[in-house]
Amino acid sequence: MSGGRGDDPGAGMAGFRVARIDELDRIALDHGIWRPLRRRLGVTAFGINAYSAEGAGSPLIERHDETGAGAGGHQEVYLVVGGRAMFTVAGEPIDAPAGTLLAIDPEVMREAVSAEGETTVLVIGGEPGAAMPPSPFEYWYSAIPAREAGDHARAAEIVAEGLEDHPDHGAIHYALACELAMDGRAAEALEHLELAFADDPRTREWAATDSDFDSLRADPRYPGGPAG
């Protein structure tokens, strides 16, 4: 049987939608070709659309900031997904081949033209601060380079930043305890490990076999494995 919702890649299925930029409508404007993506995906958490241009030198992104009557006051990220664009941002020219990302604050003037044929730019926007605070995982992920370099003091600093927004988050306390233990700061590590256990029981099981805590296991204050 054909014609069901499953035949439309943009249809809602189990909480997700799929769209392909090359299949989106091409709505010609004076300053480029609008590819309506937000409506197609049904996104309400942030703005997202795409713009295309055919041929080098063609208008792509109109000259504007995000403070005007038709704007949303958004901080925007522009991602060149195909071709090459030439942006002018705050009067500064920026050559933007595919893969280039530009983050632009609402009050900054910007515009772009295509620098080669069939250039497409994805635009994502939202009100400044609306997406904050960052998700907890961003902190321990961001600490990975310092950890792998053996700089556990720096890794601990990065992870600890997450406690400003998520003061009781067990996984952040656990990740911080790991870095502190590896940095030889036993008392601090044990304190955060206890806080991790209190918020997230899974962390007690993780700690039972986590080699990051090997230096603490002989300490009488060490809370130990699953039994506590």
Image: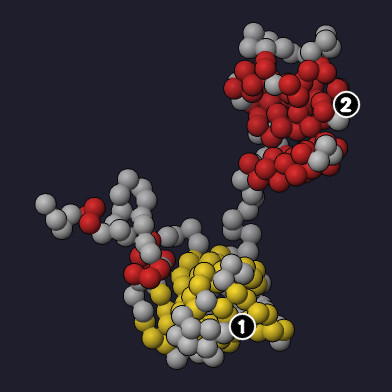
- What residue is rendered at 50% in x and 72% in y? 82
The residue at the far left in this view is: 1
Q: Quadrant of residue 137?
A: top right
Q: Nearer the viewer, mark 2 or mark 1?
A: 1
Disc 2 to disc 1, how far (Cα)? Answer: 51 Å
Q: Quadrant of residue 136?
A: top right
Residue of label 2: 184
**At label 1, which amino acid type do we have?**
Met
192 and 208: which is toward the camera? 208
The answer to whether 40 appears left or right of 228 in the picture is left
- What residue is rendered at 32% in x and 60% in y? 10
**At label 2, which amino acid type do we have?**
Gly
Residue of label 1: 86
202 and 53: which is toward the camera? 53
Badge 2: residue crowd in 10 Å (few <14, some 14–19, many ≥20): some
- What residue is rendered at 14% in x and 56% in y? 2
